[in-house]
Amino acid sequence: METKNISRIALGTFLITAGIGHLTFARKEFQAQVPEWVPLKKDDTVVYSGIAEIALGAAVIATPKKYRKTMGKIVAGFFAAVLPGNIAQYKNRRDSFGLNTDNQRFARLFMQAPLIAWALKSTDE
């Protein structure tokens, strides 16, 4: 299997696993990242974003080749859209996912760029 396909399938699996975490084992952790300005209950936001991640992950894996580039842009947009949650976690000093210092929470802010690049590169056919 081609490296790009392996990377794309790994991305889909990552998203599905994260989505399952939103709905089950990491639900409380994800609530710490929901900004105060989101007009939904924190748990509802986590559930809806988890469902979205599962759907995006499945789509990344199953999308036909001619639509993969578009799917990659959609996933990259999703990764950009969740950045305010990481900023809120840092700004509000909320411990979550083992990020229990300001430096750790600050470093987490820089993880969105590699995720965006992963989405775009692994789907660029």
Image: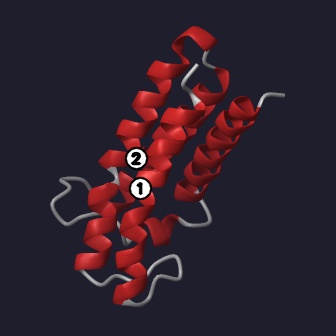
Near-viewer residue (37 or 69): 69
The secondary element bearing badge 2 is classed as helix
Q: Residues within 10 Å of mark 2 (few under 14, many from 20)?
A: some
Residue 25 at what x, y percent from top left? 62, 66
Residue 18 at what x, y percent from top left? 58, 53
Side of 79 where 88 appears, left or right:
left
Above/below status of 95 relative to 85: below
Proximity of marks 1 and 2: CB atoms separated by less than 8 Å? yes
Q: Which three-letter amino acid code belongs to the residue tagged 2?
A: Phe
Q: Is residue 51 visible?
A: no
The secondary element bearing badge 1 is classed as helix
Mark closest to the chain's N terminus, 1 or 2: 2
Image quarter of residue 87: bottom left
* Label disc, if present, on residue 94 of the rendered structure: none
Q: Nearer the viewer, mark 1 or mark 2?
A: 1
Distance (Cα) linking label 1 and label 2:
6 Å
**Residue at horizontal 58 percent and vertical 19 percent from the top:** 125
Q: Which residue is mark 1?
A: 112
**Residue at horizontal 41 percent and vertical 75 percent from the top:** 107
Q: Is residue 121 visible?
A: yes
Q: Quadrant of the N terminus?
A: top right
Residue 52 at what x, y percent from top left? 46, 39
Q: Which residue is mark 2?
A: 79
Q: Which three-letter amino acid code belongs to the residue tagged 1?
A: Gln
Above/below status of 54 relative to 72: below
Near-viewer residue (46 or 9): 9
Side of 121 where 86 appears, left or right:
left
**Residue at horizontal 34 percent and vertical 82 percent from the top:** 94
Residue 17 at what x, y percent from top left? 65, 51
